[in-house]
Amino acid sequence: MNRRQFNQFAARLGAVSLFTPALTSRAQVANFPNKPITLLVAFAPGGPADTMARAVAPGMSTLLGQSVVVENRPGANGKLAMQALLRAPRDGHTLAYISPSIMSIGPLIDKDLGFDTIKDIQPLTTGLRGGLVVAVNPSMRVRNLKELVAYAKSRPGTLNYGSIGVGSTYHLSMEKLLVGLGIEATHIPYKGEAPAITDLITGTINMMLVSGSGKPFLDNGKLVAIAATGIKPTNSSPKTPLVRDSGIAGLTDYDETVWVGFGMARGAPPDTVSKLHGALVKTLESDEVRKRLSNLSDIETCTPEELQDIIRRELTTNRQLIDSGRVKLE
């Protein structure tokens, strides 16, 4: 082989090598998934997050042609599960349950989080999303937000509210409401919604934000719903007016909905992200999954871009609230 022939051979070899990564990437996407998918859940078995994950796993398995295995990684407010997600290969074979506590609250209250929820996590879709209701003990004789303001101002320093924990969505959403109302209330955190509702019924606390689990007590009159926090009525109390429609100037844009959904580590090809999103949405919107999750909240899916916008907005409003010094996180 002379020099000219060698140079021509080298040029052809170089051209082939340039195309090889692209061809390999396309082949990987075309063959995705090529092994079981792990779905990480940041909570113990049996809770709402675990229930949702196990409800979607069979349908996704059918659509994707690979088993979807739910793996519980409870602890550290979701940090352990997310760290496991980011240690795994970023090829779409590992997904994770995500929520505001993980994506838009944790980054603001945990200095040792170890990851950036915007740069490192690719949102896929919400699964459940719905507003809460502001519920009060009937003995307060408060039936709307304007009456709540009057009640608080006539009894300075006495109003209190419960939540499912310090730094929780319920905690921050209530504080945003109080800012808009221009009143103060003492925060009393609980280890979950059930014990807080019990104390609300007995009158130990005055009010709290309540999810669909409070519907039986709203129906039997042991609790009274005075406002709904989202942009549409809730299933648990469909006739309750929205906070944003209360006529109070500081609350016209109020939108505090509780959502849970799914995400993955950034780095997978766009076609893989699209394929996972499609499988999740189709499974979540199936009659079987809707029926299984109907007692938790509304099934509401979205695009990855829409969920990213939700997370960014929550990060902004939560940061403003925390930076104001109003929320005590200790």
Image (cartoon, grey):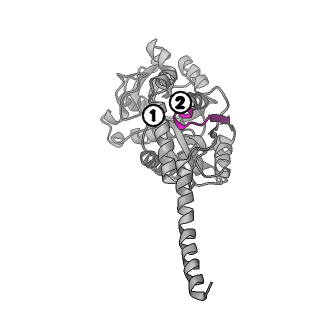
Q: Is residue 265 left or right of residue 239?
A: right
- Looking at the image, the residue that sits furthest to the bottom is 3
Instruction: Work out which quarter of the rendered image holds the N terminus and state it.
Output: bottom right
Quadrant holding the C terminus: top right
Q: Residues within 10 Å of mark 2 (few under 14, many from 20)?
A: many
> What is the number of the mark on residue 282?
1
Residue 62 lies in magenta, yes or no? yes
- Please state the extent of the stretch shown in magenta in the rendering: 60-71
Residue 219 seen in the current view: yes
Image position of 98 with respect to 242: above or below: below
Q: Quadrant of residue 52?
A: top right
Binning the other alpha carbons within 10 Å of mark 1 as few (below 14), some (14 to 19) or many (20 upward) gives some
Name the residue: 45% across, 17% down: 218
Q: Which mark is residue 103?
A: none
Q: Position of residue 98 (x, y in %)?
A: 56, 41
The amino acid sitting under disc 1 is Lys
Q: Secondary structure at mark 2?
A: helix
Find out whether the residues at labels 1 and 2 contact each other: C-beta distance under 8 Å: yes
User: What amino acid type should be assigned to the residue bearing mark 2?
Assistant: Gly
At which x and y percent is residue 92? 58, 47
Question: Where's residue 305, x and y in %?
Answer: 43, 49
Distance from disc 1 to disc 2, alpha carbons, whole Å, reads 8 Å
Q: Residue 177 or 58: which is nearer the viewer?
A: 58
Question: Which residue is at the far top?
Answer: 220
| Residue 147 in magenta stretch | no
Q: Which residue is mark 2?
A: 59
Nearer-the-camera pick, 188 or 173: 173
Residue at far front of view: 1
Write the residue at 56% across / 64% down.
20
